[in-house]
Amino acid sequence: MSAITHLQFLESEAIYILRETAAQFQKPALLFSGGKDSIVMAWLARKAFYPSKLPFPLLHVDTGHNFPEAMEYRDWFVQEIGATLTVGLVQKSIDDGRVQEEKGHNASRNKLQTVTLLDTIEEHQYDACLGGGRRDEEKARAKERFFSHRDEFGQWDPKNQRPELWNIFNGRKHFGEHFRVFPLSNWTEMDIWQYIRQENIPLPSLYFSHQRKIIERHGQLLDASTGIIPLLDEEKPKVKEMTIRFRTVGDATCTGAVESTASTIDEIVAEVAAARQTERGTRADDKRSETAMEDRKKEGYF
Amino acid sequence: MDLLVNPTESSLLRFTTAGSVDDGKSTLIGRLLYDSKSIFEDQLLAVEESSKRRGDAHVNLALLTDGLRAEREQGITIDVAYRYFATPKRKFIIADTPGHIQYTRNMVTGASTADLAIILIDARLGVIEQTMRHTYLASLLRIGHIVLAVNKMDLVNFDQAVYDKIVGDFQAFAKGLDNLPQVTPIPMSALNGDNVVDKSDSTPWYTGPSLLQHLETVQVHAETAADEARFAVQWVIRPISDRTDAKLGNLHDYRGFAGRMASGTFRMGDDVLVYPSAMKSKITGIHTYEGPQPETTPQLSYSITVADEIDTSRGGMIVKANEPAQTSQEFDAMICWFADKKTLKPRGRFHLRHTTNDVRAVVTDVLYKVNISTLEKSAENKEFALNDIGCIRIRTASPIFFDSYTKNRTTGSFVLVDEQTNNTVAAGMILKSLGDSEDFEDPGSSI
């Protein structure tokens, strides 16, 4: 008998984690951003519970700074896999005075999401949130657990993580605590793309090469066509029409594009294989300091 | 190197690395990642900048994996880090386990999911106490393959006599271990890349493969279809719907046991036992999202239906009728203790998590502790502190269904969870059941 392929192994492992999450927690939710990782995770959740429907809702923490294509896709996808959708609005957190909008032309709502996420978790009493984080993404994530404990303030303590052995996952917790669960921990960016190709999973058009008005800021190619990112007067003449695609899709203010003519999954796989930059190299939110991701995660970020 | 792994052919190899502080482990991993183009420009740039800021003499590749603030500040590695790389032949997951204070805990954790362990030796120092500890842990966790990486050969002039002596010393020691692993010694210099990715011209007397060639081709004992079939139930799929599914028909009475095939194979119509009742039944459906399947493959996930209305749910297990699991409330196990603020003593109470089961458990006796430097057993001190390894006797509140760890890594392993903090405080490997009269020995039990 031949050994299983690495994609079969990763798929089965993720399905195992998704089922463990449904079984070990009272009220889980799956964090869905419309990005490729959360799409793959929701796709796997459909497989894990087939022929039942998903035993948990998709939860979108909406910064209000969305690419229209991502929102269209979100609503289509939720219908397609027969899931229910819960939305937490960062705008509401701002209106309620829970958070203050960042000032300045580099302002992003990325960090504010943490408050909205924790508020939404509390409002709905979710005790586990499934996230699409991968260990190859960022160095602070390389030591993240599959079942990652959060204290009653939603904080992560990297020095006090539970050891995870074999395929035994310990989701025991005290009242008020919750877990973040990462079924794609062992996947790499390449695995995600190969799986999307194998499964023929439809993606938002943002991932494929297209023409877009772009402003280059601090070496990053940012969207200048939706008007979500306010431009400085001196930047306005520098806006260029470029052939780009996005390697990650998140809050529009901190998602950088790459110049690319890759318009099919096969072309993207070839491009990812040749890439010499990590995909988070295009993320402005990670560039704020060497341990930006760890600092956000400790506060309760995804 | 071409990175376009063919996803339909490439399999996965999980390995762990062990070495003392200056054996060149980070350099070796850095080289594997770098030479397989798995380090990206922005990562390398970030590491170069950090190294410069810290005043390191050369680029410190450990900073690639030591991402936490405390680690970077103190220049130590706190936790097991997982790294990924691929060649056209295989995908690899490395569990990189740091030394220092929680060494045993980290290595046991990394080894629990590994098929192979790379044990580094400094050619100038030869086999030292650390080497024996690492090898003992690898054999305890039943890692079938060890690569003995005799590193820093450049510092002993690539002298074959030095290498041969180290290999001889190591094999003499390894003979005394249970679960004797297959050992592949390789002379190398991680710093210069000798025998890491490509064969080196400096070791003409060495006829074996380079490290990467070995990793790409080694046949590890993956769970095979010939093993006894074991399927722990995670969740019961009940659509409770009158929908008609295109692949499975009407779902009104659908009741599928969801789980992952730990080992072995089921085929449609197989006679099975379903625990906890051990009632007999037959396999009537093997389902995935892709539709009904004729048989299962080890390690893959399924929803399985059986002929009779049998009472089982999470924590239950399905096995072949002629290959029953052991059932008992009392057994002996080797454990490694993980907690630094608490100890384990006889009468200690825990939650025991085994496959998908969670039961209350009490430690009825501590049979011995192992000094992992000398491999001596002693029952003088019955208290386990951080990193201690030894044999205990456990009684559970209800029966569990298991195999010995030597026979099955999935159904023979468990963890202990502290009742107050909910932390995972011990890893356990089942030796033998005490419920079964033919297995019963050791009348000196204290209960």
Image: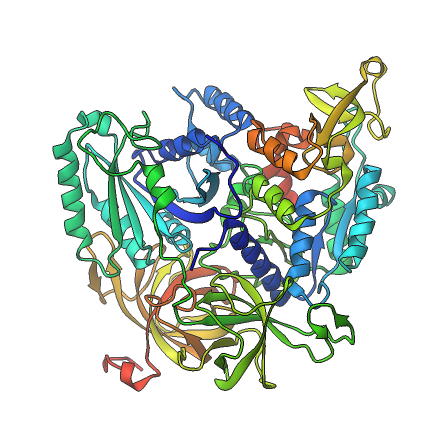
B227 vs B309: above or below? above
In the image, taking residue B273 as reference, residue A41 lies left or right, namely right
Q: Can see residue B171?
A: yes
In the image, taking residue B26 as reference, residue A89 lies left or right, namely right
Question: Residue at 76% of width from left, 36% of height from top?
Answer: A206
Q: Give x and y (percent) for residue A285.
A: 68, 32
Question: Residue at 74% of width from left, 55% of height from top?
Answer: A58
Quadrant position of the C terminus of chain A in the picture: top right
B241 vs B52: above or below? below
Name the colour scheme: rainbow
Q: Give x and y (percent) for residue B133.
A: 26, 50
Question: Residue at 17% of width from left, 42% of height from top?
Answer: B167
Q: Front-most of B447 and B262?
A: B262
Q: Can see residue A93?
A: no
B106 vs B235: above or below? above
A158 vs B43: above or below? below
Q: Front-most of A161 and B252?
A: B252
Tell how many labels. 0
Q: Give x and y (percent) for residue B363.
A: 38, 73
Quarter occupied by residue B339 = bottom left
Question: Residue at 85% of width from left, 16% of height from top?
Answer: A236
Quadrant position of the N terminus of chain A in the picture: bottom left
In the image, taking residue A57 as reference, residue B44 lies left or right, namely left
Q: Give x and y (percent) for residue A36.
A: 68, 43
Quarter occupied by residue A261 = top right
In the image, taking residue A216 as reference, residue B319 lies left or right, namely left
